[in-house]
Image: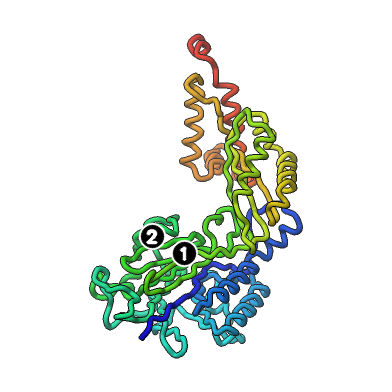
């Protein structure tokens, strides 16, 4: 029979109506965009499902956060699922750590196109189109299930050819099951070996022969970072999160369009759908840099990036490394606000999104060289080593103040949470330059 392509969207960690963190003071308009960003992103996911005419939508965990008790999240899901039902697009939901099956309230009136899968499900589920199976789904780790004719790793034919045609086999791993990867922060285009715990392998990852697997596509839900792992053959994939909620989630957010074709076999494409983009932009500031030059650098950095039609707001954090009078002036909150306002006004007509900007300064001595005193070099090396070796330097220092009583320990601990550690390191380096960077003659004769 003729080959029929299969197409679906894999999304995870939607966290509908969960609010962003670490934002700080923003305008009223930006605050509204931030509050609605996950809901707007879900609308874009639904639009993408319709635009790409997919067969089904696969949601693998943390679609919402149960502890939020959000009515808006529920309304958004009902509306989106109904739109997909009108086009005969199926939805398959596997619960995650933050949206357990009980939180979905299965007695509610969910549209008929929605299927919920439980980690306790034992059976393989057929996904049908016109009464023909186009893919199968199975929650792995649920039972000691094995295929009658397992597929060997190094001896398997092409997955989806016309001569030996069969449906795509999809395995699902709940967010609560342990998965260990060789690189927790691997790039989505990088092929990295996937290692599963022995406990999980014993269930149904492999058959009795160690070189045989049961699925072609392993759908993961593991954190907010996007990952793709080679299984030789086949793929294990986690799309990450569709909408970042802080500056740590600024890389490769989106959902994955998975297409099975006779030529490309299994093709994964990132679809960016986020309403709010989080940007981390690094700039080097030399002591002689003028305000006009800095503003031009910032303009170029922003305008070199193209805003997507669905984006409403860019959250920008400027990581500025340098020294000098201009650098020192940026340490003032009032000055930072002035820079942000002027920059946003000048590029308003060329960048059709709202901007919120924050500054993160890291002192770097542009003239540090061999002529600097040996004492100064050793001081800087000690500071850098302390930063590298200590996850929370200020807290580390507080824990070593053994001469203080418990009350003072608590006070200092509270204060450290309100301090910017990098600002303190910047001041320490400046003071070191002033106190320790003496001439060679002074070192000899002191």
| Position above or below: 177 against 289 | below
Crowding at mark 1 (Cα within 10 Å: few <14, some 14-19, many 20+)? many
Q: Residue 99 falls in which quadrant of the image?
A: bottom right
**Distance of mark 2 from mark 1, alpha carbons?**
10 Å
Q: Is residue 5 left or right of residue 350?
A: left
| Position above or below: 34 against 327 | below
Residue at 43% across, 70% down: 219
Residue 203 appears in the figure: no
Q: Which residue is mark 2?
A: 181
**Does the CB distance between marks 2 and 1 fall below 8 Å?**
yes
Position of residue 29 measured from the top left corner of the image (x, y, whole percent) = 75, 59
Residue at 51% across, 33% down: 383
Q: Which residue is mark 1?
A: 222
Position of residue 303 measured from the top left corner of the image (x, y, whole percent) = 63, 49
The secondary structure type at the circle numbered 1 is: loop
Circle nearer the N terminus (2, 1):
2
The secondary structure type at the circle numbered 2 is: strand
| Position above or below: 190 against 280 | below
Position of residue 248 measured from the top left corner of the image (x, y, whole percent) = 55, 53
Nearer to me, 423 or 168 = 168
């Amino acid at each position: 029979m003729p080959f029929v392509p299969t197409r679906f969207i894999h999304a995870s960690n939607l966290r509908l109506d969960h609010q962003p963190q670490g934002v700080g003071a923003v305008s009223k308009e930006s605050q509204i965009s931030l509050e609605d960003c996950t809901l707007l992103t879900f609308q874009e996911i639904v639009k993408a499902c319709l635009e790409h005419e997919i067969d089904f939508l696969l949601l693998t965990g943390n679609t919402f956060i149960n502890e939020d008790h959000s009515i808006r999240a529920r309304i958004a899901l009902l509306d989106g699922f109904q739109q997909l039902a009108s086009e005969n697009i199926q939805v398959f939901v596997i619960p995650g750590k933050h949206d357990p099956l009980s939180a979905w309230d299965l007695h509610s009136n969910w549209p008929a196109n929605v299927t919920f899968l439980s980690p306790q499900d034992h059976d393989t589920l057929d996904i049908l189109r016109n009464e023909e199976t186009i893919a199968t789904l199975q929650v792995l780790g649920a039972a000691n299930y094995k295929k009658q004719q397992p597929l060997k790793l190094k001896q398997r034919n092409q997955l989806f050819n016309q001569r030996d045609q069969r449906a795509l086999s999809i395995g699902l791993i709940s967010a609560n099951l342990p998965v260990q990867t060789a690189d927790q922060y691997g790039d989505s285009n990088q092929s990295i070996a996937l290692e599963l715990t022995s406990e999980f392998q014993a269930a149904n990852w492999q058959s009795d022969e160690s070189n045989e697997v049961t699925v072609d596509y392993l759908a993961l839900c593991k954190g907010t970072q996007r990952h793709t792992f080679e299984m030789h053959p086949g793929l294990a994939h986690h799309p990450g999160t569709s909408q970042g909620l802080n500056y740590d989630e600024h890389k490769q957010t989106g959902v994955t369009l998975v297409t099975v074709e006779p030529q490309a076999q299994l093709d994964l494409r990132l679809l960016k759908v986020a309403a709010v983009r989080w940007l981390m932009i690094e700039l080097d500031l030399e002591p002689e840099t003028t305000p006009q030059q800095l503003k031009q650098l910032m303009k170029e950095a922003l305008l070199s990036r193209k805003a997507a039609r669905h984006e409403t707001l860019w959250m920008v954090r400027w990581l500025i490394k340098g020294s000098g009078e201009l650098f020192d002036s940026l340490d003032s909150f009032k000055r930072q606000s002035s820079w942000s306002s002027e920059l946003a006004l000048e590029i308003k007509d060329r960048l059709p999104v709202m901007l919120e900007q924050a500054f993160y300064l890291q002192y770097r001595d542009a003239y540090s060289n061999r002529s600097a005193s040996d004492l100064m070099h050793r001081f800087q090396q000690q500071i850098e080593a302390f930063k590298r070796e200590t996850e929370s330097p200020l807290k580390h220092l507080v824990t070593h103040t053994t001469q203080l009583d418990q009350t003072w320990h608590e006070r200092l601990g509270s204060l450290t949470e309100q301090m910017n550690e990098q600002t303190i390191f910047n001041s320490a380096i400046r003071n070191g330059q002033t106190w320790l960077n003496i001439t060679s003659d002074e070192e000899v004769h002191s």
